[in-house]
Image (cartoon, rainbow, N blue to C red):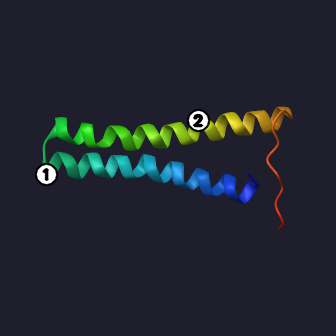
């Protein structure tokens, strides 16, 4: 993965977390709290997992174990 891919994945992860809050909010309006939490759970879990992966990958890059390529730019 190069740095551009890293940034794109970070934007996707943050987008998933933010989208999960919108899903929960609109889900509460339409279906009630328990259903909204059920709809939100997989989205926020996936977004959090992506962000945790990126944190671990950035830490390993900083230590020098698994480097993120610079890219063509």
Residue 14 in percent (x, y) is at 51, 49
Residue 65 in percent (x, y) is at 84, 33
Residue 45 in percent (x, y) is at 43, 37
Q: Which mark is residue 5?
A: none
**Distance from the alpha carbon under mark 2 to that under mark 1:** 31 Å
- Left or right: residue 44 versus residue 71 is left
- Residue for point 20% across, 48% down: 27
Q: Secondary structure at mark 2?
A: helix
- Left or right: residue 11 versus residue 40 is right
Q: Secondary structure at mark 1?
A: helix
For disc 2, the marked residue is 52
Q: Are marks 2 and 1 in contact (CB under 8 Å)?
A: no
Locate the C terminus and report the quarter of the image it occupies.
Answer: bottom right
- Residue for point 65% across, 37% down: 55
> Who is closer to the viewer here, 22 or 47?
47
Residue 35 in percent (x, y) is at 18, 39
Q: Is residue 31 above or below residue 71?
A: above
Q: Is residue 68 above or below residue 59?
A: below
For disc 1, the marked residue is 30
Extreme residue in the front direction: 1
Sequence-wise, the earlier of marks 2 and 1 is 1
- Residue for point 44% across, 50% down: 16
- Left or right: residue 47 versus residue 20 is right
Q: Is residue 3 above or below residue 44?
A: below
Q: Tell me where residue 42 sits by quadrant.
A: top left
Q: Tell me where residue 66 sits by quadrant.
A: top right
């Amino acid at each position: 993965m190069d740095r551009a891919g890293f940034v794109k994945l970070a934007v996707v992860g943050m987008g998933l977390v933010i989208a999960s809050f919108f899903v929960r909010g609109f889900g509460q309006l339409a279906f009630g709290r328990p259903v909204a939490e059920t709809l939100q759970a997989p989205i926020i879990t996936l977004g959090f997992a992506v962000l945790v992966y990126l944190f671990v990958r950035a830490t390993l890059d900083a230590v020098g174990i698994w480097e993120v390529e610079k890219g063509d730019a």
